[in-house]
Image: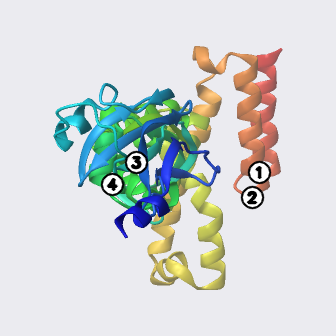
Amino acid sequence: MALMDFIKKQFIDVIQWTEDGDGTLAWRFPMSGMEIQNGAQLVVRESQVAIFVNEGQVADVFGPGTHKLTTQTLPVLTYLKNWDKLFESPFKSDVYYFSTRQQIDQRWGTSQPISIRDKDFGAVRLRAFGNYAYRIQDPKSFHSQISGTRERYTTQELEGQLRGLMLQHISDAVAGSGTPFLDLAANQIEFAAALKEATAPSFTALGLELLSVTMQNVSLPEELQKILDQRIGMGIIGQNMGQFMQYQAAQALPEMAKGGSGGSGIAGEAIGLGAGVALGQTLAQTLGQGLAGVGTAAPAPAASKPEDIVSLLEKLGDLKAKGILTDEEFAAKKADLLKKLG
């Protein structure tokens, strides 16, 4: 009976793995009760690593090439098996292959806005997404901590864990880059480099190497976008705070006029109580100071340039279109500015 069992046994002469391109990271060679023949060939292709595991303990590791399996090429397994001489009979051992090629175009992104600390605004909420690439660097560590004894382990199964690591370190990346939040969109390369540096150690602990990180988009929350728009508006008329207040007053007058005429809104209620008159005088005074500055500030170097005078004419045209300046007032200011061009 024992002789028949021996005859029925199947022996493995060649061990190899042809990747099927389905994102497999680790694959166990199917033994199905078969035994590895002494002197069998182990074929490891480029971008692959094979390891022998004996009773759950990682033994020998093989890189790319064709290897003949003997006691000389399996020193750790030989020790674990207590082979005190050249083994002549077949043996059993789990063989695992690992793909070490780059796993590219892996996606990361914030499903919900996340809070970060910014030096300009304190706590803010951020949305961002991009790509990253990695590969298996330490198959032994990856086997013991991630893939284990499973028959197959794929990138899809690891995706959620790795994306979580990326998001976990976004705050560290923002702090490490030193880039103000409002400048992140214009400094995506620096942000991505900081995110890679902050996250790489967590990948290494899993036996992986984080190869690259790219940033595709950083979106600003609505409240910060409004602040950014205000800064842009300030930049149109200069950085002087008095000028900014005049600009704000000019922007607010048309809306207040609408509210007052209809008897509704804050301005309308204020007018109904008599306070609207004082408010209107204050705004008119502020606006008047700004317009006076347009006419009297001509000697200043900034207003003597033709392009600055043209810009001021355009702003005056906007005020006339909004009904803040009359046609006569606009014509008088325009004449003064055109004289300076001559």
Contact, CB < 8 Å: mark 2 with mark 1? yes
The amino acid type of the residue labelled 3 equals: Val
Of badges 2 and 4, the one in the foreground is: 4
Q: Which class describes the residues within 10 Å of circle 2: few (<14), some (14-19), or many (20+)?
A: few
Can residue 303 be seen?
Answer: yes
Q: Which residue is mark 3?
A: 95
Q: Of marks 2 and 4, which one's residue comes earlier in the chain? A: 4
Contact, CB < 8 Å: mark 2 with mark 4? no
Q: CA distance from mark 2 to mark 4?
A: 70 Å
Residue at point 58%, 85% (across, down): 264
Q: Nearer the viewer, residue 166 or 117?
A: 166
Q: Which residue is mark 4?
A: 146
In the image, residue 45 lies at what x, y percent?
A: 56, 33
Residue at point 56%, 30% (across, down): 46
Q: CA distance from mark 4 to mark 1?
A: 70 Å
Residue 323, label in figure: 2
Q: Which residue is mark 1?
A: 320
Residue 275, label in figure: none
Of badges 4 and 1, the one in the foreground is: 4
